[in-house]
Amino acid sequence: MVVAKTTEIGSLQRLSDAKDLVFVLIDDERRILSADAQLGRYLALPPALLETGRDYAEVARFCHARGYYNATDLSLSIKDIVATLSSRQDLCRDFVGPEGRRIQCRQLPVGEDKTLLVYRDVLDPDTMAVALRKSEHLLRDFAEAGSDWFWEMDENYNYTWFSDNFERSTGIKAETRYGRNRLDLIAEWSDEDGAERHRQCLDQRQSFRNEISRPKMANGQEIWLRASGSPFFDDAGIFRGYRGVSCDVTEEIAFRQQATSDAERVAAAMDGINETMALFDDQDRLIFCNQAFRELNFGIIEIISPGVTFEELVRANVALGHFPNAKNQTEKFIQQRLRQFYEPDAPVDLEMEGDRWVRTSIQILENGDRVLTANDITGLKRAEADLRAAKELAEQANRAKSMFLANMSHELRTPLNAISGFSEIIEKELFGTLGDHRYAEYAQDIHASGQHLLAIINDILDLSRIEEGQDELDESENAIGDVIQACMPLVRERAIAARIRIELDIAENLPPVMIDLRRIKQILINLLSNAIKFTESGGRVTISASLQPSGAMEIVVKDTGIGMQAEDLPKALEPFGQIDSSLARRYEGTGLGLSLAKQLTETHGGRLLVESEPGIGTTVRMLLPPERLITAPRLAGESPVRED
């Protein structure tokens, strides 16, 4: 096409060298593509009328108004003149201007979409002959410049002439086609009824454009041609045949067929997957959908075709009752679905009739198209419902257990207190000697066992109250060093008996903290008791307190005991969690210590962190948040100031 365009311009420039011949080239919408600069002077036109892209009908109207279209044998209306410009007919007319000047205009169709208008003065017969030769050369230049070729056939549709491009493009000599009928030479049409429709067009003397067919070729080639043609008539108006242009479109047809084949293969692949898919254009009209989409919308299958809008599909489904959630709020549901389609955010779960659920997603492509995908998640929804039901049952059972234990506080503690009290009286022989010393030893064992059982019950009840949210903190201002010191007498005897050294490392000038004193002491005693219990004789337990850079108060209990594997730490923090059943036999206890300490620390808004290594020991860090520290001094009678 670039070559053809360049040749057109060059030919027009060569033509403009003839002073007695001027031209203008227009497209099929009458827009000026190129004009001889002399045309303005030739017809006395304003320069603006000949600008590229201007409608040449304006030139015709200007000349008509000045009387240039007064023909010698008839008068033409401006409507007739403009219609002639758009007719793409090969014709020649003489006009007499207002000064009696005789001008001839030759109109030549060029290619598929251009028309060449050649003006000349016809007073001089020699000038007429020169102009005719030049126009013929110009037409030949156009004909031979591109890959298209020109042809002519007579009133019986037999070919009478081909331009040289025919042989160059097809490899077949033009003379082998002369005298042969166009319809007989066509082996196949692109349309099923192409042959009949084309014959009717010719018989009615109509122009045809872009007719695609496969001709019979002597060398066995199979090529596809695109042809356009117009009828021509003699001066008496008698039909003399057709003239037109053709080009080889074999590659184009092959590309289209391949594209169609590829599209069919893609469609077949999409139909073969279970996922629902549909493609909508930027106007929300359906372009393509797979079989799964049609099955999902089985109730409205009759309207599912390219061009139907997403809104129309939604409204049709709602009208059939496909969406239970749309009942009694139809328009609200529809508008919500449209918002989700136009402004997709996250996948949307939709309940369908028949207790089915689908999860839909919308993806916007760069060109504005939207891809809708959907998956059936009915099984997933049922599993979620079963899981929720099981969770609710478990929570109900847990609440029942916790309520039972919380309500059993008095019933469990009262007899244990009596056992502990009476065994202590017997052990100390407050009402007289028992005689055999073994009675005192048994009474001591009864008292110790009762105290141990009472401690276990207290831990269980405390844990139950925390889980039920019934444990409220009784907060007061305390110095953490004093709290630690108050815990020492309660664990010192046990440490001495186990030959374990307890060391304190409390930083100076620590600010007071707002805590539930009883609960913090319970945490520290549990942590210290655990450290002593799992540390071998001769070992060491260290408790320290300091401020962290973050402002948190850190209390650390560190031992040199047996330690734990890192993967066992989560289990150790669970209620009743001991990592080895053999430990339960060797070290008495229920495993509630760490779990209760963790729960009580979190009730204070803090965190309990455990680090351990087998054979090295365990370190437990209790972090109280900065807002529990009292950092501003108080006057007498003032409430504590906390950093919130």
Image (spheres, helix red, strand yellow):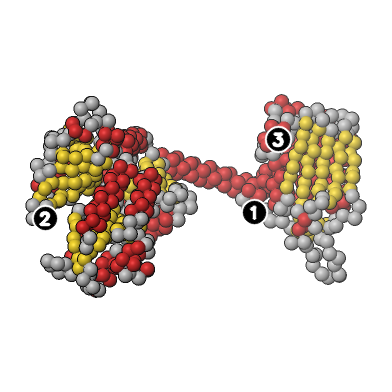
Please state which of the two labelled residues, at mark 2 or mark 1, is closer to the viewer: 2
Q: Amino acid at mark 3?
A: Leu
Q: Is residue 125 left or right of residue 468?
A: left
Identify which residue is drawn at 57% across, 44% down: 398
Label 1 crowd (10 A; few <14 / some 14-19 / many >=20): few
Query: Sequence-wise, which precedes: disc 2 or disc 1?
Result: 2
Number of numbered discs on residues:
3
Residue 242 in the image: state x and y as whole percent: 16, 46
Q: State the residue at coordinates (79%, 65%).
A: 641
The C terminus lies in which quarter of the figure? bottom right
Q: Residues within 10 Å of mark 2 (few under 14, many from 20)?
A: few
- C-beta proximity under 8 Å, tags 2 and 1: no
Q: Nearer the viewer, residue 578 or 150?
A: 150
Q: Is residue 377 left or right of residue 577?
A: left
The quarter holding residue 45 reads: bottom left
Q: Quarter of the image holding residue 619?
A: top right
Where residue 74 sits in the image (x, y, percent)?
12, 67
Q: Which mark is residue 470?
A: 1
Q: In the rendered structure, find residue 235 and report the number of the disc placed on it.
A: 2
615 and 32: which is toward the camera = 32
Label number found at residue 569 = 3
Q: Is residue 106 visible?
A: no
Q: For the residues marked 3 and 2, what is the alpha-carbon distance in whole angstroms?
A: 109 Å
Secondary structure of the residue carrying tag 1 is: loop
Q: Label 1 sits on what residue type?
A: Gln
Image point (78%, 28%), residue name = 614
> Which mark sits nearer the N-terminus, 3 or 1?
1
Residue 56 coordinates in the image, percent (x, y)? 29, 63
Give percent across and percent down for residue 571.
67, 35
Q: Secondary structure at mark 2?
A: loop
Give left or right: position of 499 versus 18: right
